[in-house]
Image: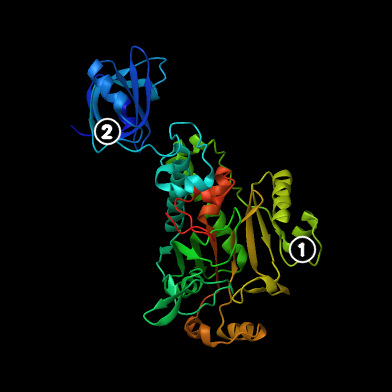
């Protein structure tokens, strides 16, 4: 007999079916027992009345994997999921009795502390609220790919072990590569730019590594980066439009593919305006009440700007453009009209920086001048710069931190709540 998922039971009323999953909960009443079975799709309720079957259910432990064969019955007004339940069941164990986890997975919310959940991640992730965040994450990535595929982008896969620690000056994880020094890649930035010279429009979904000793609710040492680069742009505004369309595609897919997960978490999906409001960095400082000579936006400034965007534009999103060149990587294109400022941007989502992007330099001579101005040697960048000697179009791109996006979307207080197995300053297991 083919296995039936819990969400399919409503289509089999009156039929004998086979379900399989984990013992989610047992409710032992005087005259009847209820066995709640959890599978990847949801919950199914099994009514157990026969004395022998009841004795078997009483001996089960939560999270034991079982198979149940029974008849699907519709019950109006009952508390069973979708108003159907299985009766006259035969229960068979598919493994040894499970040792119950150190917290109750059947409760509406996990009451264990976050460190306890992370220590026991393989079982904590079974809770509907934890798995719902991962379903939203998966749908967001599917929407990211679909939106870009539809616009002629090509997915690429770039090395995560590199020979030079050069990207953005951030701390790196060093490793031994057959006796030679190597590093975990901090981003695919250089490679995705080079691939613009091949495909014009490219994207990548992959891990990036930052050995920065952050111990905050918004940083991880390894996270998933959604990277995009496109050629033949006029300036950073073309990149901003591409980002806007990509976000709309991601949120559309979350709504259609992960609707049940959205409902489980009570998430309000934001609307992406046809044109996301934008302010120049200098204007952003004034709005946030920051000093005019501030070189960057602090988290408090971002929150103030998010409130302003919601109040003045009814938008959960806000572009801040024209960051000072001093705070942007050397490959960022300056604003031709105001060279001290960049053709770069950040996108704030509900008052939190979500995306960094902009127009890049594309002339070999400009790269040499940018490195000289910063007092950096050309040698470590030689393989990267060589492509620009052979013709590269005006281009630009952006990167979205997936875990940060999902955390902000779901209202999670800590990015680790939406990460399956987070890696940070303190955690290398499980």
Q: Is residue 400 visible?
A: yes
Image quarter of residue 321: bottom right
Q: Position of residue 282 (x, y in %)?
A: 76, 63
Secondary structure under tag 1 reads: helix
Q: Position of residue 241 (x, y in %)?
A: 58, 58
Q: Nearer the viewer, mark 2 or mark 1?
A: 2
Image quarter of residue 30: top left
Which residue of the protein is positioned furthest toward the left in this rendering? 1
Secondary structure under tag 2 reads: strand
* Among the two numbered marks 2 and 1 on one chain, the one whose residue lies closer to the N terminus: 2
Q: Quadrant of the C terminus?
A: bottom left
Along the line of sight, which residue is nearer the eye, 243 or 102? 102
Q: Which residue is mark 2?
A: 66
Q: Is residue 88 visible?
A: no
Q: Which residue is mark 1?
A: 282
Along the line of sight, which residue is nearer the eye, 423 or 267? 423
Q: Residue at x 50, y 74 (%)?
A: 190
């Amino acid at each position: 007999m083919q296995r039936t998922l819990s969400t399919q039971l409503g289509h089999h009323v009156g039929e004998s079916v086979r379900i399989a999953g984990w013992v989610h909960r047992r409710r032992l009443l005087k005259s009847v027992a209820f066995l709640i079975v959890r599978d990847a799709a949801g919950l199914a309720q099994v009514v157990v009345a026969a004395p022998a079957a009841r004795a078997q259910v009483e001996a089960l432990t939560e999270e034991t994997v079982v198979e149940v064969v029974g008849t699907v019955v519709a019950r109006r007004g009952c508390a069973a999921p979708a108003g159907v339940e299985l009766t006259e069941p035969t229960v068979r164990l598919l493994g040894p009795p499970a040792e119950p986890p150190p917290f109750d997975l059947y409760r509406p919310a996990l009451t264990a502390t976050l460190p306890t959940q992370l220590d026991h991640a393989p079982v904590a992730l079974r809770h509907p609220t934890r798995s719902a965040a991962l379903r939203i994450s998966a749908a967001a990535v599917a929407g990211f790919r679909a939106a870009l595929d539809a616009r002629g982008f090509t997915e690429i896969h770039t090395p995560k072990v590199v020979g030079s620690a050069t990207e953005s000056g951030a701390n790196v994880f060093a490793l031994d590569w057959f006796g030679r020094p190597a590093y975990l890649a901090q981003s695919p930035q250089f490679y995705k730019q080079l691939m613009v010279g091949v495909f014009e429009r490219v994207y990548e979904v992959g891990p990036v590594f930052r050995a920065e000793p952050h111990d905050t609710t918004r940083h991880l040492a390894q996270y998933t980066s959604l990277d995009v680069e496109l050629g033949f742009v006029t300036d950073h505004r073309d990149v901003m439009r591409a980002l806007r369309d990509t976000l709309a595609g991601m949120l559309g897919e979350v709504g259609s593919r992960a609707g049940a997960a959205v409902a489980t978490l009570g998430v309000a999906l934001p609307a992406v305006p046809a044109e996301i409001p934008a302010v120049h960095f200098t204007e952003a400082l004034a709005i946030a009440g920051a000093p005019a000579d501030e070189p960057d936006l602090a988290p408090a400034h971002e929150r103030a700007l998010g409130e302003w965007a919601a109040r003045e534009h009814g938008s959960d999103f806000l572009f801040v453009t024209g960051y000072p060149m001093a705070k942007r990587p050397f490959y960022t294109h300056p604003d031709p009209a105001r060279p001290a400022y960049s053709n770069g941007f950040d996108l704030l989502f509900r008052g939190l920086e979500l995306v960094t992007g902009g127009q890049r330099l594309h002339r070999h001579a400009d790269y040499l001048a940018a490195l000289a101005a910063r007092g950096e040697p050309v040698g470590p960048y030689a393989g990267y710069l060589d492509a620009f000697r052979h013709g590269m179009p005006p281009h630009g791109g952006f990167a979205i931190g997936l875990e940060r996006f999902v955390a902000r979307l779901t209202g999670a207080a800590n990015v680790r709540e939406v990460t399956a197995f987070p890696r940070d300053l303190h955690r290398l297991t499980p």
